[in-house]
Image (cartoon, coloured by chain):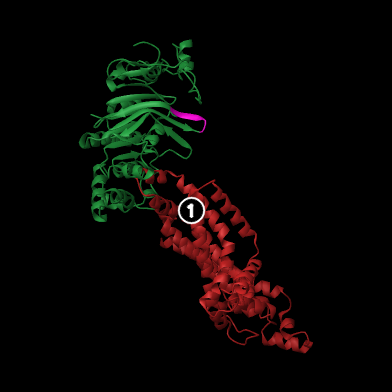
Amino acid sequence: MTALLEVDRLQVQFGATAAVRGASLSVARGETHCLVGESGCGKSVTALAVMNLLARGGERKAERLAFEGEDLLKLSERGMARLRGNAMAMIFQEPMTSLNPAYTVGSQMTEVLRRHKGASQRAATDRAADLLARVGITAPGLRLGQFPHQLSGGLRQRVMIAMALMCEPKLLIADEPTTALDVTVQAQILRLLAGLQRDLGLGLLLITHDLGIVARVATRVSVMYAGEVVESAPTAELFAQPRHPYTQGLLRCVPVPGKIQRDQPLGAIRGTVPRVGHGFAGCAFRERCDFADETCQRTIPRHSAGATHDYLCRLPA
Amino acid sequence: MLRFLARRLIVALLVVATVMTLAFILTRLSGDLAVSIAGPSATQADVDAVRKAYGLDRPLLIQFFDWAGRAVTGDLGESYFFKTRVATLIGERMPVTLTLGLTGLVIALAVSLPLGILAAVRENTAFDRIVQVVALLGQAMPSFWLGLLLMILFGLKLGWLPISGTDSWESYIMPGVVLAFSAIPALTRLTRAGMIQAMGSDYIRTARAKGLSRASILLKHALRNAAIPVVAIAAVQLGFMLGGSIVIEQVFALHGVGFLAWESIAKNDFPVVQSVVLVLAAIYVLLTMLADLMNAVLDPRLRGA
């Protein structure tokens, strides 16, 4: 069976800066695939490149970029617009600014269904109210008539989620949907996404830098570093047996109650992410890696550690 | 919403009161009105008689409150020259000026909105730069000069449009274009800047992520937000146009309020001058209030403010 979303060796350039350098990943139906990594590693850019929503000046290239077997690279902007918000939807990191301040919640939600499914205003309004209730918003009828500025951040993010679900997408890309929210709301939203994913069987590509979230919701994890996917594995396996030194370092940075002593320093990865320009070869992590030697300057082969686990490092499994 | 309106109304009344005071003081500063009215060959006795007849011998404060009190009730006094009620005079001339101003505004918006939107969509392309240069040239061109050029070309050489008078709607085209020309640069640049800002915003990314059509993204989601500063400036520009009609009505011999103002200044008909200034200021204040209201319609966040 073909995966819902296939990304093979995706590259994104902004002028001389390479934001994504050959990232590969795939999302199956009914799967929650988490994309993790520190700020600036190319997670969001990867998602935007998939949706073809890159900011001006961004150029994407890939060996393959397919949704349900359809080549997205060959699709015109018009063809892409037919998919967006319809079969594939996206939620953004900034709930406070992602809704248009000039239109009511209802107007912004219904226009998606009207556009893609040709629904009547009444049918679209009913569906919007239904979805708002589903994402845990009380008095949906009232909310539909309100403007974004009358809603809190948590409510706005729920509206964004409900809006993304209007056309029953098969793939939902959520770019740090909870980063801007406080912890209680965060937990609610994650539960909500997990529930929706289970109920609707949608493929979820969840971008986050929070490993706690990953442990709770992910089926599969891909770790990004400096524009590359350096390791990809089923969640339990990645936490139990991380292969890439960067993944190992990331996991050491997470405080685990009971395991980490109070006076013991928390793990940290020394150094900072290098600026990777055009023509950079070898491992981008080598400057910060304890195991690096001169072979790390050559092109690194992808190693596999089992059928569903692979990583990008010269170290053997 | 009611509080919003009430606050705007109070500010508007204060502005009108200020303008009334200024209009009154400025006409008094222009010299001894009694001497001007009496004319160059008048004797001292004539001047004194005029001063008494027009109530100019009373203290300034009394004169002011007398005039202001009447003006508030709609009585703007009588013209020294036309010997008719000033309110009637202005009422007769106002339609011409309003038609001219609105024609100018409509032309200005019809040109600057599409130009601004296109320039924003094609930011930093040759089209965008040409629009900006043309806008700059437009702003630098004196309106009376442009008016004369148009008259020579379309009125005399080509004979397409009448060069003066108000006989038909066609008479308003050339003066309307000239008035619009002064407003187009600012409106175009504002539309362009607003659209560029809106198009770079998160909610436009959301609109694109929803797969909306390009027209819907540009005209529904971006333009509504970009229009807010444009509406405010359009109202101010319409105010300028009504004031600017003092020059343009001269050039095209349109007998509007601007023409009346010019005539009255030349003839020292100060009740008319004072009243024209007052009426134009009141219209201007009304326009800015209207713009505030329209913006409250466009941007729901302003309704609570």
**Residue drawn 28% across the image and 49% down it:** A113
Left or right? Give the position of A250 relative to B79. Answer: left
Camera-side residue: B24 or A219?
A219
Residue drawn at x 58%, y 66% as measured from the top left = B240
Residue A6 vs A302, above or below: the answer is: below
- In the rendered image, which quarter contains the C terminus of chain B? bottom left
Q: Is residue B289 magenta?
A: no
Relative to A306, is A14 on the left or the right?
A: right
Q: Is residue A261 above or below residue A166?
A: above
Rendering quarter of residue A48:
top left
User: In this orientation, which residue lies closer to the viewer: B57 or A281?
Assistant: A281
* Main secondary structure of the magenta stretch: strand
Say whether residue A149 is visible: yes
Residue A282 screen position, x and y as percent: 46, 17
**A123 sits left or right of B122 in the view:** left
**At which x and y percent is residue B117?**
48, 53
Q: Quadrant of residue A82?
A: top left
The picture's colour for chain B is red
Give SS at disc 1: helix
Which residue is denoted by mark 1 in the rendering?
Answer: B117
In the figure, B109 relative to B51: above or below?
above
Mark 1: amino acid? Ile
Residue A139 appearing in the image: no
Q: Chain of mark 1?
A: B
Query: Which of the two residues, B285 or B242, is positioned nearer the viewer here?
Result: B242
What's the magenta region? A15-20
Identify the colour of chain A in the image.
green
Mark 1 surroundings: few (<14), some (14-19) or many (≥20) residues within 10 A = many
